[in-house]
Image: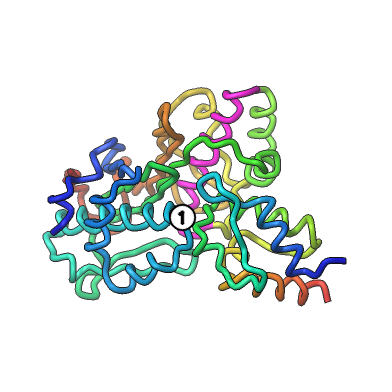
């Protein structure tokens, strides 16, 4: 298929426990975009046409095609057998010949960067954001941050403030996406462990907003973007839960 | 006073952008914010802007669920009635 002729536009990015994270290059590239389009099924091509602007169209095609290639490799299936659906709050799921795939995944993109996270089991959420100054940043701060988080942000200035906001946003968004309730969940009530605001890049947490679940949370931000991954922990010593199977060795390239 | 549709259109122009460009909305509001490519962060902020402007309840999830901005304007009018 076209992806190999055009060269891959994704690469391994991070190993997070039993989860694997792949970076997707979303910079404009005619060959990559043409190859990606060839991987989309009819409904995805229709979705692609509905986007009004080239940026969102490009990000959708490059991420969805990369996801298709990587799932097909992992599952050993042909692309035509793979289909996607969305849950009520937008979380995507995949099937092969109508059966749910035995792998957890989640996708995020922002600007020129996409991230795809995979895990053997357990709910999984990923978020990436380019740190572009938002015109409604103060409104977002009031809306998505809890009282202590707002107080912490109030003690920072300039770039440090922007970095801290995006760090908090991506961690909350990753947790909310993993949980599956999307924007129906109040992000200000999903409190990020304070140690992660002070530079710790990995922690575990439980939230009253998401009762009965313990999450592993990883800050994957770098100089180019803010990013985080949240993964549901099982009850068996920190492996991913969900279906009770032993974790597989990540096999994404 | 401007109609709800005109105010919604103005709020989109003032508050939403894609890749640094303001979002252009047709006069009949026959466009979906999802199809525009608005991010979840933009949805959260825009829902708050709508709530502040019209004093109606609206969540980001509601905002993302409307097929077109025309439906959002109709929802606002129905809530305010």
The residue depicted at 71 percent of the width and 71 percent of the height is B73
Q: Residues within 10 Å of mark 1 (few under 14, many from 20)?
A: many
Left or right: residue B23 versus residue A77 is right
The residue depicted at 11 percent of the width and 60 percent of the height is A76
Most foreground residue, A250 or B75: B75
Location of residue B47 by image quarter = bottom right
Location of residue B27 by image quarter = bottom right
Percent coordinates x, y for residue A129 in the rendering: 47, 41
Q: Quadrant of the C terminus of chain A?
A: top left
Specify whether residue B25 is painted magenta: no
Q: Quadrant of the N terminus of chain A?
A: bottom left
Q: Residue furthest right?
A: B1
Reading the image, the residue beneath label 1 is: A179
Under circle 1, the secondary element is: helix
Percent coordinates x, y for residue A53 in the rendering: 47, 57
The residue depicted at 23 percent of the width and 60 percent of the height is A102
Percent coordinates x, y for residue A134 in the rendering: 61, 40
B25 up-or-down from A162: above or below: below
Most foreground residue, A48 or B81: A48
Is residue A146 in view from this perspective?
no
Left or right: residue A136 versus residue A252 is right
Location of residue A225 by image quarter = top left
Range of the magenta residues?
A: A156-182
Q: Main secondary structure of the magenta part?
A: helix
Specify whether residue A177 is painted magenta: yes
């Amino acid at each position: 298929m076209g992806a190999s002729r055009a060269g891959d536009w994704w690469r391994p990015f991070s190993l997070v426990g039993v989860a694997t994270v792949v970076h997707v290059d979303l910079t404009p590239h005619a060959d990559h975009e043409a190859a990606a389009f060839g991987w989309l099924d009819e409904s995805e091509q229709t979705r692609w046409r509905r986007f009004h602007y080239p940026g969102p169209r490009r990000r959708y095609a490059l991420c969805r095609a990369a996801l298709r290639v990587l799932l097909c490799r992992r599952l050993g299936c042909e692309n035509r057998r793979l289909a996607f659906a969305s849950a009520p709050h937008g979380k995507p799921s995949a099937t092969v010949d109508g059966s749910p795939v035995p792998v957890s995944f989640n996708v995020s993109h922002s600007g020129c960067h996409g991230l795809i996270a995979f895990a053997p089991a357990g709910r999984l959420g990923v978020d990436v954001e380019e740190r572009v100054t938002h015109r409604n940043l103060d409104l977002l701060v009031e809306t998505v941050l809890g009282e202590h988080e707002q107080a912490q942000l109030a003690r920072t200035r300039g770039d440090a403030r922007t970095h801290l906001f995006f760090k908090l946003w991506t961690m909350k968004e990753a947790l909310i996406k993993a949980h599956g309730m999307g924007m129906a969940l109040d992000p200000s009530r999903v409190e990020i462990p304070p140690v992660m605001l002070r530079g710790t890049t990995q922690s575990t947490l439980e939230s009253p907003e998401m009762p009965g679940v313990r999450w592993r949370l990883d800050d994957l931000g770098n100089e180019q973007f803010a990013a985080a991954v949240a993964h549901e922990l099982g009850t068996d010593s920190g492996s991913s839960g969900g279906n009770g199977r032993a974790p597989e060795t990540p096999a994404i390239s | 006073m401007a109609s709800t549709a005109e105010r919604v259109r103005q709020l989109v122009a003032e508050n939403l952008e894609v890749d640094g460009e303001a979002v252009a909305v047709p006069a009949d509001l026959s466009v979906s914010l999802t199809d525009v490519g608005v991010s979840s962060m933009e949805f959260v902020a825009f829902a708050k802007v709508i709530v502040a402007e019209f004093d109606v309840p609206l969540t980001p999830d509601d905002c993302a669920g409307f097929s077109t901005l025309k439906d959002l304007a109709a929802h606002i009018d129905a809530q305010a009635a």
